């Protein structure tokens, strides 16, 4: 599947998921990130793979003196995020590719957050390279990705055997 096909599938997926948005804070990766976060006030923070912006909004409201930039591949996701969070002054949404972030982001961020995105990109190595490029020299990051050595391996195996798509808890994703 080429990148345009992946993009189109994500556009459709985000449109469907926006209609049935659920409480994302019950998802274990967000619970883990919240526990690990330092005080982000005063920092430039980027969230890559922000989807429809729920966690970015949480960050902006929890750390009102932080500057949050939230990026997603899907124009539909960013449109939903922008319409839902118009009054949050320290939060900016932008369409972008985790593997090729804007050049204006070079050496800009104190903190990088990406939850459950790495496993969906075509080239994880490129995404990792972008983390290094956009972080300041002493910048830090939190990156979560699925762990197939936990109970998810049983669910994944069942899906594989039944030839059904895998749902990690946030809907069946295109890639």
Image (tube, rainbow, N blue to C red):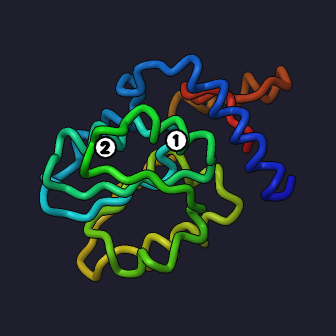
Local packing at callout 1 (Cα closer than 10 Å; few below 14, some 14-19, many 20+) is many
Question: Which of the two residues, 4 or 154, is positioned nearer the viewer here?
Answer: 4
63 left or right of 104 in image: left
Residue 165 percent across, percent down from the top left: 76, 28
- Residue 33 is labelled as 2
Q: Say whether disc 2 or disc 1 marks the residue closer to the N-terminus.
A: 2
Q: Quadrant of the C terminus?
A: top right
Query: How far, Cα to Cα, is label 2 from label 1?
Result: 16 Å
Q: Which one is nearer the viewer's eye here, 91 or 44?
A: 91
Whether residue 147 can be seen here: no
Q: Is residue 174 above or below residue 122?
A: above
The location of residue 151, given as percent across then percent down, is 53, 28
Image height check: is 23 above or below 109? above
Residue depicted at 63% across the width and 34% down the height: 14
Instruction: Using residue 90 as the reference point, say whether residue 48 is left or right of it.
Output: right
Q: Residue at x 42, y 75 (%)?
A: 105
- Count of labels shown? 2
- In the rendered image, residue 75, in percent from the top left (x then y), is placed at 62, 47
Q: Position of residue 89 (x, y in %)?
A: 25, 48
The reply to whether residue 120 is visible in this rendering is yes
Q: Is residue 94 left or right of residue 125?
A: left
Q: Which dot marks residue 115?
A: none
Q: Which mark is residue 51?
A: 1
Q: Left or right: 72 with respect to 158?
A: left
Q: Nearer the viewer, mark 2 or mark 1?
A: 1
Q: Secondary structure at mark 1?
A: loop
In the image, residue 30 sits, relative to residue 42, either above or below, namely above
Instruction: Report the front residue among 74 and 146.
Output: 74
């Amino acid at each position: 599947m080429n990148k345009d096909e992946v993009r189109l599938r994500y556009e459709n997926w985000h449109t469907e998921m926006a209609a049935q948005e659920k409480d994302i804070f019950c998802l274990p990766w967000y619970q883990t990130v919240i526990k690990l976060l330092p005080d982000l006030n005063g920092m430039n923070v980027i969230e890559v793979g922000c989807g429809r912006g729920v966690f970015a909004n949480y960050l902006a409201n929890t750390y009102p003196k932080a500057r949050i930039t939230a990026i997603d591949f899907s124009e539909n996701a960013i449109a939903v995020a922008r319409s839902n969070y118009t009054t949050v002054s320290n939060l900016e949404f932008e369409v972008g590719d985790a593997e090729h972030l804007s050049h204006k982001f070079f050496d800009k961020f104190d903190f990088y957050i990406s939850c459950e995105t790495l496993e969906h990109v075509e080239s994880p190595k490129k995404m990792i390279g972008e983390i290094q490029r956009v972080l300041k020299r002493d910048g830090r990051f939190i990156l979560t990705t699925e762990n197939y050595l936990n109970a998810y391996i049983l669910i994944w195996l069942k899906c594989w055997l039944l030839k059904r798509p895998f749902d990690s808890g946030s809907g069946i994703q295109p890639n």
